[in-house]
Amino acid sequence: MKLSIIVPAYNEGKTIEKILTKLVDVQLPVAVSKEIIIVNDCSKDNTETVVQNFIRAHPSSEMQYVAHTVNKGKGAALHTGIQAATGDYLIVQDADLEYDPDEFNILLKPVLDGFADVVYGSRFMGGNAHRILFFWHTIGNKFLTFLSNMFTNLNLTDMETCYKLFRADVIKGISLNEKRFGFEPEVTAKISKIPGIRIYEVGISYYGRTYEEGKKINWKDGFRAIYCIVKYNLFS
């Protein structure tokens, strides 16, 4: 089995080498190989130089690099990565350091045990490390998850999580439209409509960062998420 790891990046020159090093070094089960797909969403910093130097320094690792000529948004970068992926399963890895690739194995377990087609990594369940940051962000995340669950009839605890593991044929078979952070509610709504889909959730760590450290999501994205929840559950 091959796992495709999609890394959307926009102005992540300060952290992307660290996360790529973690991805190259992460030890997956013996039966699982990996490919890393970096999608540079027209960064204005040195992200491209850092990535290209890293790829040249690691010729034995299976990596693809794709660059957008204009900034399109995280969702659009994920669309590009999904199209380029050749693995049996896909997972999203943000280019910052908020999520730990060593926990891929936690998400892979329900898949390798034959139970799951999709696995969400929840920041709000289990006893793993969780950085204490923004109260209203937490309330917002839980509200969006609650609203999404009302429409999808799922009992997720963290719909907005970055760590979502998909069977490749499932995610490639979905028509995705959202170009920014609306990807999360859209894909959740559309996944939930697939007959017989097996969705699991596992607890993960979360090493959140502040806006000074490069966090990009804001209140406007929250309102867009509400719009996407209603749109893709009722009218898609």
Image: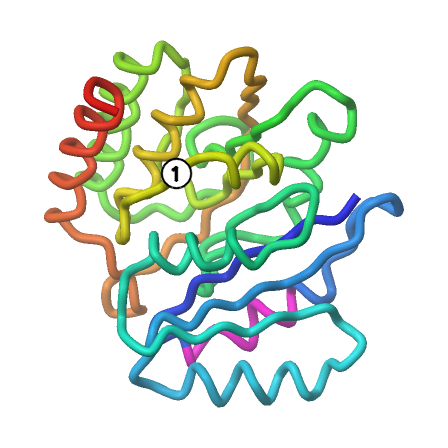
Q: Is residue 67 above or below residue 170?
A: below
Q: Position of residue 199 (x, y in %)?
A: 54, 21
In terms of depth relative to the viewer, which is nearer, 77 or 199?
A: 77
Residue 103 drawn at (x, y percent): 64, 45
Residue 207: percent from left, percent from top: 45, 53
**Label 1: which residue?**
175
Instruction: Left or right? Give the position of 211 relative to 29.
Output: left
Q: What type is the residue that disc 1 sits on?
A: Ser
Q: Is residue 20 magenta?
A: yes
Q: Quadrant of residue 70?
A: bottom left
Crowding at mark 1 (Cα within 10 Å: few <14, some 14-19, many 20+): few
Q: Specify the quadrant of the image occupied by residue 24.
A: bottom right
Vertical relation: 219 (above or below) 14: above
Q: Position of residue 47 (x, y in %)?
A: 43, 82
Q: Is residue 129 above or below residue 60?
A: above
Please give the name of the residue rendered at 29% of the width and 48% of the height, measured from the top-left corner: 133
Q: Residue at x 34, y 56 (%)?
A: 76
Write the residue at 42% across / 53% down.
79
67 falls in the magenta region: no
Magenta region, residue range: 13-22
Identify whether 236 is placed above or below 182: above
